[in-house]
Amino acid sequence: MTILRGRQFLHTPGPTNMPDRILRAMDRPAIDHRSSEFKRLASECFDGLRGVFKTKHPVLVFPSSGHGAWEAALVNTCSAGDTVLMAETGAFSDMWKKMAVALGLAVEYLPGDWRHGANPDAVYDRLAEDRAHNIRAVAIVHNETSTGVTTRLSEVREAIDRANHPALFLVDTISSLASMEFCMDEWKVDVAVGGSQKGLMLPPGLSFNGVNKKALLSARSSRMPRRYWDWNAFMPDGKTPGFLSTPSINMFFGLHEALIMLNEEGLDRVFARHARLAGAVRQAVSHWGREGAVELLSRDPREHSNSVSAILMADRYNADDLRAACIKHTNVALAAGLDRFSGKVFRIGHLGDLNEPMILGTLSAIEMTLKKTGVAYRPGGTTAAIDYLA
Ligand code: PLP
C-alpha cells in the first residue's frame, strides 16, 4: 500500500477544508448548554449568522444536515396539497423536489437541462399565469452543487415582483453561503436554507433557516404536522432563536470561530477570493479542453459557480477512473458527478478555507492525472491558471 504523506487536498464541494483554528476551537469538552457561558456564545453565533445571511431577521440553527433545513423550510410554510413552484437545476433541486412531493405538496417543476440555472423568465411566465395565486411558494437552489451552475437569484426575485405574485421565496443557499454573494433581505428571500459544511468551513451537522416576517406569518397558517422542525419550538417569542433539544455544543464552538474568521477577512473579500480561485480553475479547464476532451458543464458565463466547477468529459472517458487515479497518486479528492452525470463529470469544490497555492496544487495534480490516464487534454492548463492569478 502506498502511503501518501501530507494533508489530503479535499475538493469535495462540502464538506470542505476545516481550518486548524476551527478544529482547535471544537477540540474541548462540552459545557452545560443551559449555562450563561453557552447562552452568550450561542447568542453571538445567532448575531453573526445574520451578517452572513445579510439579514436583520432571525437565523435558526438545526442539529442536522442540510436536508433538515430543506424540510423545515417546507413544513413551516406550506400545508399538504399546496402548490410549490420549483426549478430543475440538477441533482439537488431533484432531491428537494422529491422531499416536497413526499410531504404531500403539489410540485410544479420547471424543466431544466442541468447546464443552466433556473430561468427567471419561466418563473415569471408561470406566476403571471397564476391569477388565482394558487402557488404558495417558489423554491430555488441558488448554487446547484451537482452542476456548478448558479441561478441569477436577483432576477428570479424581479420576476416574482414583476408578476406581482405573493408567493413565498424559499432559497437553498447551501453551497453559496459565505462563498458567493447572497443577500437575504435585499432579494426578499423569505426562507434561506443553509448548511455548515461548505463556506462556513465546519463539519456537516448544522443547518440553518433564515426566516423573515412573511415566512413567520405563513407558519401560523401552515397545517403541516411538525415538531422537530417547528420554527416556533426553536423560537417561541418569534424573535430570539434558541433550541428545542440539546444543541450541538461543540459545533457551536466551531461556528463561533468560523464567524470570527469570516468577519476578520470581510465577506466581500471572501467572495472576491472565491471568484478569483474559481476564475483560475476555469482558465485551466478551458485550456485543457481545447482538443474537446473536457469542458465546463456550466454553459452561461453569467451562471458559472464560484464555489464549485463541474467538468464534463468526452464520452470515451470515465470521470470516476480519473478521480480514482487522482486520489491514488496525488491524494487530491475530487467529487463525483451525480445522477445523470455519474461517471461523466468530475467536480472541483473550490470553496471555504482555500488559497492560491492550494488550488494550483490541485490543478497540477489534475493535469498530471489527465496525462497519466491518457486523456487527450491540451497541456498547460495549470500554467494558464498561474498566468491568470499572476
Ligand atoms: N442543497 C445543496 C445545494 C447541497 O449542495 C446539498 C449537499 O451537498 C444539500 C442541499 C443537502 O445537504 P445535506 O447533504 O447536508 O443534507
Image (spheres, helix red, strand yellow):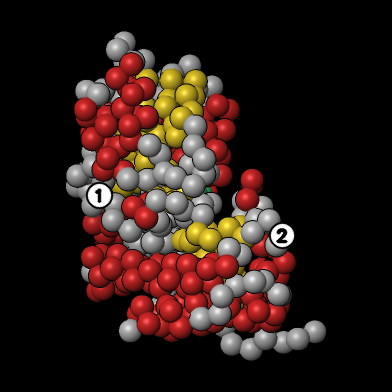
Residue identified by numbered label 2: 316
Residue behind mark 1 = 183
The kind of secondary structure element at disc 1 is loop
Q: Does residue 246 sit above or below 201 in this rendering?
A: above
Q: Amino acid at mark 2?
A: Arg
Q: Nearer the viewer, residue 383 or 210?
A: 383
The amino acid at mark 1 is Cys
Residue situated furthest top in the rendering: 132
For the N terminus, give its image quadrant.
bottom right
192 or 141: nearer the viewer: 141
What residue is rendered at 54% in x and 22% in y?
Answer: 104
Q: Which mark is residue 286?
A: none
- Residue 237 appearing in the image: no
Earlier along the polypeptide chain: callout 2 or callout 1? Answer: 1
Question: Which quarter of the image is occupied by the C terminus?
Answer: bottom left
Q: Report if the CB atoms under discs 2 and 1 are less than 8 Å apart.
A: no
User: Looking at the picture, how far across and down is residue 305, in whole percent?
Assistant: 40, 57
- Tell me: 91 left or right of 266: right
Q: Residue 301 at what x, y percent from top left?
A: 37, 55
